[in-house]
Amino acid sequence: MTDFAKTTISSCKILRNEVHTDSDSVLTVFQDMQNKLNISRVFFVHANRNTIRGNHAHYKCNQWLICISGSVIVSLFDGQDYRQELLEKGSEILYIPCGLWTSQEYSQNSILLVLADQLFDEDDYIRSFEDFKKIKMAE
């Protein structure tokens, strides 16, 4: 499990996967992920129009984000440093450990697949940016 207090932007990683294309299709392979992922929950976010979602942090939950349609700009903040990652339909998975404030900016008709290592627990969420900054500064 990731230590909330020690999580920084550098803890985020992009995992690249195999992509095989031909004239009719694209096959994206996520293989041998068993040692990298411990998944307890899977969900999709489908944005019908340009929108921003997220705007929270987790105490314990680690997530892996995969854009399966359109594009999503993921903003990350660790209490000191800020970074953005562009996820487009393709072969990248963005690993986001707990302890980071995140938001996602969706283009129209985007779909984001989220893999989480914790079941939903409202008490795991930090939904106030000001509270997040206070908690990170106190650690």
Image: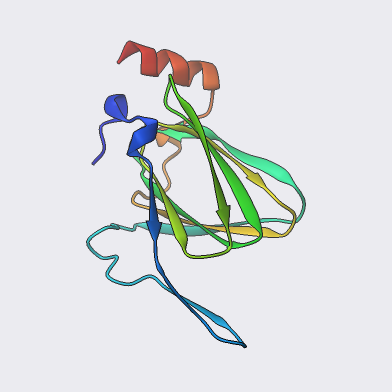
Quarter of the figure with residue 29:
bottom left
The quadrant the C terminus occupies is top left
Q: Residue at x 41, y 42 (%)?
A: 121
Residue closer to the observer: 78 or 134? 78
Q: Looking at the picture, does residue 102 appear above or below residue 133?
A: below
Q: Along the horizontal axis of the image, is 121 left or right of 72? A: left
Q: Residue at x 29, y 65 (%)?
A: 33
Residue closer to the observer: 31 or 37? 31
Q: Residue at x 53, y 28 (%)?
A: 127
Residue 42 location in percent, x, y? Answer: 45, 59
Q: Looking at the picture, does residue 131 appear above or below residue 9?
A: above
Residue 89 location in percent, x, y? Answer: 58, 63
Residue closer to the observer: 11 or 50? 11
Q: Residue at x 25, y 65 (%)?
A: 34
Residue 47 location in percent, x, y? Answer: 69, 54
Quarter of the figure with residue 6:
top left
Residue 4 location in percent, x, y? Answer: 31, 29
